[in-house]
Image (spheres, grey):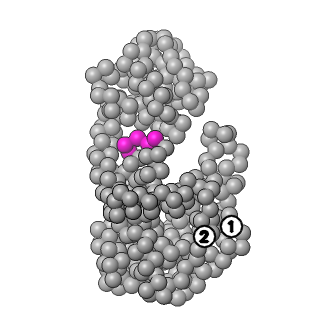
Amino acid sequence: MEVVEQVRRAAQALGLTGRRVLVAASGGVDSTVLAHVLCELAPQLRFELCLGHVNHGLRGADSEADERFVAGLAAALNVPCAAHRVDPGRRRAGCSSLERPTLQEAARELRYAALEEMARVQGADRIATGHNADDQAETVLLRLLRGSGPDGLGGIPERSADGRIVRPLLGVSRQQIEAFARARGIAWREDRSNAKGDYARNRLRRDWLPGLAADFNPRLLRAIGNLAEAQRRDSEWIRGQVERHAASLFSVEGAWLRIEPKDWSEAPEALARRLAREALVRCGVGRLATRVHLERVVAFLRTGQRGKRIELPGSLVLTRDRRGFWLGPLRGETPVGPDRPC
């Protein structure tokens, strides 16, 4: 069938041959179909399979039923299975309002950490998730509607930067996945929270995407997927340029990031903004940086005078002396340089 062939091509491109692969199995249709298809392909492509389930404990009895379902799925496929429980609510406790992740962000962070631990215990060097073409379209459109920059339009990558996380279903639509499951008689668990209108992604999935596809482009998923891939490739190249410039401009001295004062007035705006963001990320406040903050940083790097400074989110300050610019803690020690005795 088409789904099997698409996953086979993706598995080969992602280098799964000879690997041990942990499938992140939630019990939903995407990961359940992925587990079935990879199990079917494993002998042909010579990789081993195991399942890993993360119980977030957010849906009461349904969460417990999901865990039991995945254990039964693993038994039916005759593959090993591991399960791990996490507490997103506890992860959010004790954080300031600026630093506190949303419940979904906390669940995602803990989920990937749990999957990494299960993969380590199971001896798996790849983790396969069930993200599909609909997830890709939803992610790109949500980021666009929320004002994402170009990098955000790259969407969900087919693999993580370190190659550990792979997504063999990214080119397959949810419609294809559900049709495959019904044709094969594959059962799955429905997450009833997906039908609620509380989350923007659910409203986009239910109310907007079907109309956009019907009224504007029946191949909408492919069009958005192609856009995401093209933007991701461009961003990967640009990222290399940013890292090369950052290596020559940034250095760490104690609690401070020292920034060379040269070349800022000649740097293209796009590069200057990306370097400004990189500096803030290295100081741990990339998540708090807005377009306005980046513009202020770039303007200061281009025109800032010695002895002047600007304050930034996360209790950071950007200042300048004879040696260059310094980005560091607002209430910390003064950076040490020729102008500033120890």
Residue displayed at 29% across by 52% down: 230
Q: Residue at x 43, y 11 (%)?
A: 305
Q: Is residue 148 magenta?
A: yes
What is the x, y in percent for residue 17? 32, 75
**Residue type, numbered disc 2:** Asp
Label 2, residues with CA under 10 Å away: few <14, some 14-19, many ≥20: some
Pointers 2 and 1 in contact (CB under 8 A)? yes
Q: Position of residue 215 (x, y in %)?
A: 38, 59
Q: Which residue is mark 1?
A: 59
Q: Nearer the viewer, residue 329 or 217?
A: 217
- The reply to whether residue 120 is visible in this rendering is yes
In the foreground, 8 or 44? 8
Image position, residue 150 (x, y; %) = 37, 43
- The overriding secondary structure of the stretch rendered in magenta is loop
88 with respect to 248 (left or right): right
Task: Tell me the residue that label 2 is attached to.
Answer: 191
* Residue 82 seen in the figure: no
Q: CA distance from mark 2 to mark 1?
A: 9 Å
Instruction: Please name the amino acid that badge 1 sits on.
Output: Arg
From this view, report whether residue 240 is shown above or below residue 192.
Answer: above
Q: Nearer the viewer, residue 53 or 58?
A: 58
- Counting from the top left corner in percent of width and height, residue 129 is at 46, 67
Quadrant position of the C terminus in the picture: top right
Residue 149 located within the stretch drawn in magenta: yes
Q: Quadrant of residue 331?
A: top right
Tell me the element at label 1.
Answer: loop
For label 2, the SS is loop
Q: Which badge, 2 or 1, is on the more N-terminal residue? A: 1
Q: Quadrant of the N terminus?
A: bottom left
Q: Considering only vertical position in the picture, is 239 above or below 42? A: above
What range is drawn magenta here?
A: 147-151
